[in-house]
Image (cartoon, coloured by chain):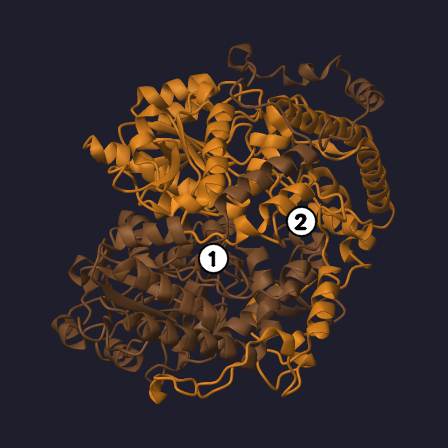
Chain colours: A orange, B brown
Amino acid sequence: MLIFEQSHRGRASHAQSPNSDLEGSVLPAEALRTSKPNLPEVSEMQVVRHFTRLSQKNFSIDTHFYPLGSCTMKYNPRACNTLASLPEFTGRHPLGPSLHGQGFLECMYELQGMLKEVTGMQAVCLSPAAGAQGEFAGVAMIKAYHDDRNDTARCEILVPDAAHGTNPASAVMCGYKVREIPTGKNGDVDIDALKEAIGPQTAGIMLTNPSTLGVFDRKIKEIAGIVHDAGGLLYYDGANLNAILGKVRPGDMGFDVIHMNLHKTFSTPHGGGGPGAGPVGVSKRLKPYLPVPIIGKKDDQYVLLDENDCPQTIGRMSAFAGNAGVLLRAYIYARMLGREGMPRVAEFATLNANYLLKRLMEVGYDAAYPERRATHEFILTLKKQAKELGVTAMDVAKRLLDYDFHAPTTYFPLLIPECLLVEPTETEAKETLDDFIDTMEKILAEAKEDPELLKQAPYTLPVRRLDDVKAVKQLDVVWKKGEK
Amino acid sequence: MPFIPHSDHDIEKMLTAIGVDSIDDLFDEIPDNLRCGNLDKIPTGMNEMEVSRFMRERAAKDGLPLCFLGAGAYEHHIPAAVWEITTRGEFYSAYTPYQAEASQGTLQLLYEYQSMMASLMAIDVSNASLYDGASALAEAVLMAVRANKKSKSRKILLPRSINPVYRSVTDAIVKNQKIELVDVPFDAETGQTDLAALEQFAGEDFAAIVIPQPNFFGVLENVDALTQWAVDNKMLSIGVVNPMAMALLKPPGEWAGSGVDIVCGEGQPLGVPMASGGPYFGFMCCKQKHVRQMPGRIIGRTTDLDGKEGFTLTLQAREQHIRRSKATSNICTNQGLLVTAATIYMSLLGPEGLKKVGMASHKNTQALAKHLSAIDGVSVTFSGASFHECVLTINTDVKQLIDELAGKHHILGGFNLSVDYAELGNAILVCATETRTDSDIEMFATTLDNVLNG
């Protein structure tokens, strides 16, 4: 039932609104609203019950194993939320003088420093609100760099075919054309194809390493050499940083600019699809172009550096200083891990992924790259099952929901047919992985005995498979009064 | 090991199953010369007790000054239930609802959010949110250029009365696509967009005009005239509004009768704490005919295999994970958790409650302006009616004044306008929401009088 269907005219959560009227107001009548918005008229308890019950229809990290590849669904420590929600932090006005923000700004200054250290970059700006905005900022810096050198013939960004969809979309938003580079048979970038595609028109390349194929590109130094020799710059998509935290640094691989997804590697909550935080880090030559504000230190005071301090900046990505509350949570997480805890993240994420891959292969699943080591995630392909049994990756994913496991990422990357991208993260216990393996084995048995069972799954959730075609054709995105 | 559950026994069994001797062997594909050493510049870890004490000390340094500052972020009362429910693990730690059957809670909530926002704006449709108000305006500008099929123009009329940081964010995001923002001046007496000056652009080809309500000065624009002007001059209109004002003021879908094409803005006033500027959420609504040009996630209602009602992501063919380089935007997330808070907030307030918050904020600011302008050397700058912010001209250096109020008196006295609007001289933008009491306002007035004239 929708909240609107519980609404009764004249009912209200009376404790929640101030007493006020328009007596003595100078507002002109023609500026006022005469229609009443369709907000629900309900009691406080109705609201609490309605949204509590809605929450119970969700799978989440707190309730379920959530091995969604490329999303790093690890435990979000409660302390990070509690401490970032201290009243001085939540009550701070973003334009308040830095005098009333030294505690917050010091945390942010130190977070910049820690991110620099762990990525091997020369400078960091925290303000991009999400990975995609970090990508935009990164590519815009590449463009500003070439433009400043009057190197304006560079109109193309290279993107491997395995890349996240945001990569080409971000490049286009910066005014670039996108050229795709194919992946070689072993999962690494096809070096010959790269050499063929690169040239004086190349502004840069956007890479994820480990790639979305769940393997570490061993020729990364060679790729960096080829791109730099051609005058291009290298962009690092930090979506998979969890795999290499404290082990390898993008700066040491030769990247000029990176974004980090703090909602992945630094364990800030995904919140049902956001907020994220996508700080960017740069090498020395891109430092002048970083977005503002940046946290600086002047005369022992922490301050926000702006356009006056950074005249070559690409500008601002949001009204204030980015998703401050997310950044605080990431800072607290980083302080709890410490220098010794960061490499352990990569180690146990990798241990869990390789264990899961090995055991799933033993029970009959095919790896997309069986000869490669898994990183923090890996890909299964159900090509064989689709052909022989008519059971697809989507069917297995939906059946997993019936067994109380969130599904892995399905049908991404696009170049692997019938694929499941599985990322267990370091915070899952062996028993959970073993339960998942047993369930996957059972589903495979079901697929052989009764494929139809899988094709109709799930059966036990609040709804069964939804009609996505109808959702587009009979578009209903807003409830209207008088409707059921 | 913090947050890692493995016992030595587990590790041994897992390594044996994989067939390697050590965890380090799992990194054998990474070339040795790329492996980094210790992260010496990062401090060692703290346990929860240690980090709690440490963060409380940091927080205490910031204090909680009395706030008369707005300028795009506002202190409103947030009912206790809002964040109690929002931080339930099932909302807090869920991901994007790609597996619809396992995400009906988030999906239905987003559908209800879209319904509430569209109704509050009195327009057809809403998306499931963008990053913040400023970047939402940038997306609205890109959308208008795509959606205006009758014009090939890449120029947008942008009033100077818009929040100046919205202008710089929009410019930073759209300039690489060669879109030009053209200033429209404001009337020095009323603080409204200058309709006479706007006439110089009549007949010229623009993709759209942006119309703020209220504008950055808190002043109400003549939104009907501006919207009609856009229609007459064959361009799209983009409203930028404070959603808190929309239960009280005429909503953008009703401006000039037929309403604006697109409306966006900052959702923070609806149940999101100020928190140093984020995370907030940007909202965006539009007319039905533009829905396929709208960026961001959209949730639709549909039915399942048994004919039962359910909710799912829809119109995904606009989005980057399907369309890649041809997507309407690169945006991948929405601000789901903030929208969760806003939806609970709007449900608790209802149409009357939201209107009362708007009225109380408006009346408090009116009282504040009256008290402050009674002080020697302080006057109200603009004659135009205002919502819950007001510009005052003060006969002293505003930056120094603000610093003194904050440093000595723990009062955030307002936003210094003299940097972005030199022509206003020493001008300050002040705000009093429903959270300020009569005695807060009197205290600010007494303090200001003492500082200026004491």
Q: Is residue B164 left or right of residue B47?
A: left
Q: Residue at x 47, y 36 (%)?
A: A106
Q: Nearer the viewer, residue A64 or A23?
A: A23
> In the current view of this chain or complex, which residue is farthest to the top?
B33
Q: Secondary structure at mark 1?
A: loop
Q: Which residue is mark 2?
A: B93
Q: Nearer the viewer, residue B450 or B326?
A: B450
Q: Is residue A119 above or below residue B226?
A: above
The N terminus of chain A, quarter of image: bottom right
Q: Nearer the viewer, residue A449 or A178?
A: A178
- Residue A318 shows in the view: no
Amino acid beneath label 1: Leu
- Identify the subunit bearing mark 1: B
Q: Position of residue A135 (x, y in %)?
A: 42, 40
Q: Nearer the viewer, residue A431 or A211?
A: A431
Q: Is residue B33 above or below residue B371?
A: above
Q: Is residue A466 above or below residue A375?
A: below
Q: Residues within 10 Å of mark 2 (few under 14, many from 20)?
A: many
- Identify the subunit bearing mark 2: B
Discs 2 and 1 carry the same chain letter: yes
Q: Position of residue B341 (x, y in %)?
A: 59, 62
Q: Which residue is mark 1?
A: B130
Q: Residues within 10 Å of mark 1 (few under 14, many from 20)?
A: many
Q: Secondary structure at mark 2?
A: loop
Q: Quadrant of residue B123?
A: bottom left
Q: Is residue B151 left or right of residue B356?
A: left
